[in-house]
Image (cartoon, helix red, strand yellow):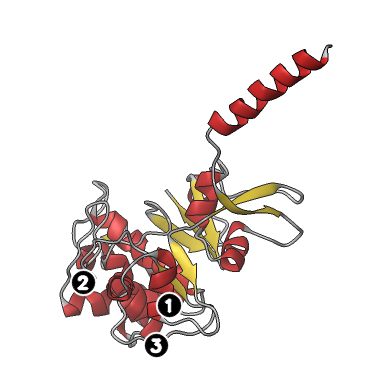
Amino acid sequence: MSNVTRVIMGFFILIGALVLPTAAFAATHTVVKGESLYIIGQNYGVSVNALAQVNGIKDSLIEIGQKLNIPESGQSYIVRSGDTLYRIGSKVGVNYQEIMSANGLEKDYLYPGMDLYIPVSNGKGNGAVSRGGLPARATAWEVDLLARLITAEADAEPYVGKLAVGAVVLNRTRDANFPKSIYEVIYQYDRGTYQFEPVMNGWIERSATPDSIRAAKATLNGWDPTNGAVYFFATYVTNQWLWSRPLCDIIGTVAFTY
């Protein structure tokens, strides 16, 4: 091959590299033993949904040695030491008041490890976020009822797990196979039993925790880390029908399915 030919081929290769679009990723992560999408997302400050989407993962299963692309930004932000709502808003380009509204925050208190949903900015700084037809507003009684169920079902689970439980209730109100209101979904009695164990054993009457109240408000404002799941159950459950449902994710010790 002549030097002229090499120069010409090199020129076209360079032009091709400049023209072809490339995806922008913050990092590449190699999966090690004991990791899950949730743990990896926590470390990088991105959501499980975002990780799954950019890597083409449909069943949340990952393998040791698998390389994952870490997106520039996800639907969630993991609070780090020294963060404030204003600083986070500046980083992600969203007014801090929008972040407060989307997460049901009444005060600006944050703590390291806290999982915040980052909404799409509405440019006004006061927006209630509504996605997928979920109600942007609810009565104080409905918020409390939803928060009490989250407390009873997921008090020991991570915050994103609390959000997922609340999202399942709201997803059921939009599904033709379930009742249409928060109250009717939570108190649904079918085939001789209640749909949610806390209603049957009375735990639903316990006061909601602050994190569960925040999670209830955030899900009512549109955050659904399950992307439409309508069932959840503890991972120790052996019910074959429940496990036969398409799996969304396992968060903490709870499985979420469609």
Seen in the picture, residue 97 relative to 166 is either above or below; the reply is: below
The image position of residue 228, as x and y in percent, is 37, 51
Amino acid type shown at disc 3: Tyr
Q: Which residue is mark 3?
A: 109
Amino acid type shown at disc 2: Asn
Q: Is residue 122 left or right of residue 161?
A: left
Q: Which residue is mark 1?
A: 87
Quarter of the image for residue 4 reads: top right
Mark 2: few/some/many CA within 10 Å (<14, 14-19, 20+): some
Compare marks 2 and 1 and give the one earlier in the sequence.
1
The tally of labels here is: 3
Q: Residue at x 51, y 74 (%)?
A: 157
Q: Is residue 95 left or right of residue 160?
A: left
The image position of residue 12, as x and y in percent, is 64, 21
Gap in angstroms between the C-alphas marked 2 and 1: 17 Å
Q: Which residue is mark 2?
A: 126
